[in-house]
Image (tube, helix red, strand yellow):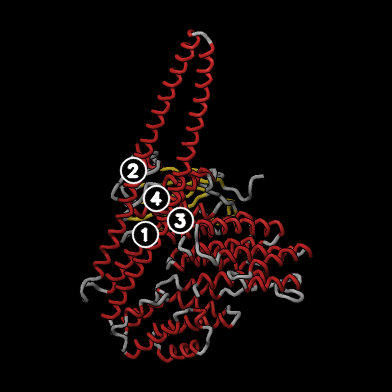
Amino acid sequence: MSIRSILCALLLAIPLAVTAQTNAYDIDDECYSYFRQAEGLVGKPGFRAANDQLLKLAREKGDTKAETLYYVEELKNLTRFPSSTENDAKVEDAHKRLKQVAKDFGYSQYFYYSYQLAETYYYNNGKVSKSFALAQEMHQQAVADGDEYGIWCGDKYLASIYIDQDDFVSAKEYLLDAIQIYHSSEDPTICRQSPTRLYCDLADTYPVGNDTVGIYVSKGFDLAKVHLDTLRCAFYRSKLAILDNNVPLYEEYRDYCMADPLITQISASAPNFFSFMDDVIAGKIDGREDEIIKLNKVREIKVIANVCEHRGLEDFAFRLEKKLVQKLEKRFSEINQSRLSELNITMGKAALSADLATTESKLSKVSMMVILLLGILLAASLLFSLIYIYNHRKSELKDKKRIEELKEANEQVRLANEAKTRFVQNMSHEVRTPLNAIVGFSQLLSLPDGTLTPEEKDEFAGHIINNSQMLTMLLNDILNASSMDKGDYQINYGMGECRFMCQAAISSAEHRLQPGVSLTFEPDFEGDHNIWTDSHRVQQILINLLTNACKHTSEGSIVLRCSFSEKPGIVTFSVTDTGPGVPEDQAENIFNRFTKLNEFVQGTGLGLSICREIAERMNGKVYLDTSYKAGGARFVFEIPDKTEPDM
């Protein structure tokens, strides 16, 4: 069972474990009987009859919760079938109906569960972008509604998506937010849950062998509430023990885990992991790298490679890490290819719709002209020749004007095609650059044994992962620009803490620093300062500005500042670097789409344009400080300093 399937099942169980009189769902007992029948027949013959009976009985008895469960089962049943154009449409309709019913009846837990079912359906069918968009929409909706439970579920679900893709850097932000909500919440549904899984997942976001891993695993163990939590921590501690070369302690945890049949719910590959690790300890692992690389947990493979290297099996560790890099490269390539395919389909549908609309408009106009022309000809045949000639010449003038209009429309189509071609060529170049880097470093990692040091291997592997993430950023920029053009880009306001937003942005961007460059945060205030804003959009702008500075700064420093005194009533964020700077005459041009002053620097030329558009939607602004003369560049982001929403 995958991480995502387990998480989805746990999230369903959370809101439903309510104290009831005679059943776990606190619905009418007769309705409960039909609900259990429908639940057992999901995806099987007989489901329709059982679920229809549940709806009929629920309405007769006025049981709104049982009626809501009918729509839950409808959506759940559809998600059991393979993806197709027809089934995708049915899933979308069922998802909308369940959200509306849950909202009307006041069962917010099922409102968010609807997102989880739909998102899991698309993810399991390889539509990662659609799945991720739904998860983000769920989280944004919860933030907009101020629903703490929904935000908490959204954090956990977004983290699970990133973990499934081995993107632990992106998952960390949502894990930290979920943990913060758990410890500060008074919601009984949240408080009843255990945070152990969150802490263990957070431990995985740190490098193998890092001291922080043990700290978070211990924290998860201290807060364990059920046996599965204790078992999870024991599995993590077995890995920590062998990394510390404490074989007796490792064997103690191994025996404890293997004696429990539930260990496969923690990790389906746990038995194989222990088997491989025992062979490492016995020195009988050589030649089995192809078996190990099949483990579905990248972290477990890293642990094995790390232990092998420290136990004198450097050659085997090198071969295993080489295969791991190839596996990650293939996975990132598949993910990006999936996103590109989804993007092409979306763009293709949009273009087809536009062509059909244009054709329909032209046909309508031509039809009207034909009718008018027939009327003129009929009138001319009944009137004397002078009137006929007059009307005929008038018709010729209209035709001439129409021809000119068609020529102008054709010219616009030609220009649009040229723009599309330039865009595709630009994107081909931008995608090819990181791919070349990935291939190049992969070839270096395949050099004969002894050519590279372990530090160089880690550095090259980091370059490969970094360039794969750059491909993802390129696609995200395009999707953000597309959302803004369509008008469905949302700003969701809430309270945000300035210091936290700045530090979160630094955490997301600091891995892009070039060697020797420092990144610091300098606030001009003490303690916390909350403002009414969209904290995720603020972080998105800051991350873009910091990433831009990292690209262009090869030495010196980058400083992120936050000030409440620079302009009264305004929160001023600024990013100052020691890079080559921007010519003053280009201060506005750089905010145009697809504008790049240095064609050799990676990027689509969309980042600064997106930052400015988001800021303007938040009643703020982003600009280059042309008065800054200390060397490098200073980009400024300003938003109103408000502590409550406008009435």
**Looking at the image, is mark 3 or mark 4 earlier in the sequence?**
3
Q: Residue 580: which numbered mark, if any?
A: none
| Mark 2 or 1: the one toward you | 2
For the residue pair 495 and 283, the one nearer the viewer reads as 283
Residue 34 makes an appearance in the image: yes
Is the residue under label 1 in contact with that under label 3 (CB below 8 Å)?
no
For the residue pair 636 and 384, the one nearer the viewer reads as 384
* Residue occupied by mark 3: 522
**Looking at the image, is mark 2 or mark 1 earlier in the sequence?**
2
Residue 138 makes an appearance in the image: no
Using a 10 Å C-alpha cutoff, classify the residue at mark 2 as few (fewer than 14 neighbours), some (14 to 19) or many (20 or more).
Answer: few
| Mark 1 or 4: the one toward you | 1
* Residue occupied by mark 2: 421
Q: Amino acid at mark 3?
A: Glu
Q: Residue 576: which numbered mark, if any?
A: 4
Image position, residue 51 (x, y; %): 67, 67
Using a 10 Å C-alpha cutoff, classify the residue at mark 1 as few (fewer than 14 neighbours), some (14 to 19) or many (20 or more).
Answer: some
Is the residue under label 1 in contact with that under label 2 (CB below 8 Å)?
no
Alpha carbon separation for disc pair 3 and 4: 11 Å
Is the residue under label 4 in contact with that under label 1 (CB below 8 Å)?
no
Image position, residue 538 (x, y; %): 50, 52
**Looking at the image, is mark 4 or mark 2 earlier in the sequence?**
2
Label 4 element class: strand
Label 1 element class: helix
Is the residue under label 3 in contact with that under label 2 (CB below 8 Å)?
no
Q: Residue 512: which numbered mark, if any?
A: 1
Alpha carbon separation for disc pair 3 and 1: 20 Å
Report whether 275 appears left or right of 614: left
Alpha carbon separation for disc pair 4 and 2: 36 Å
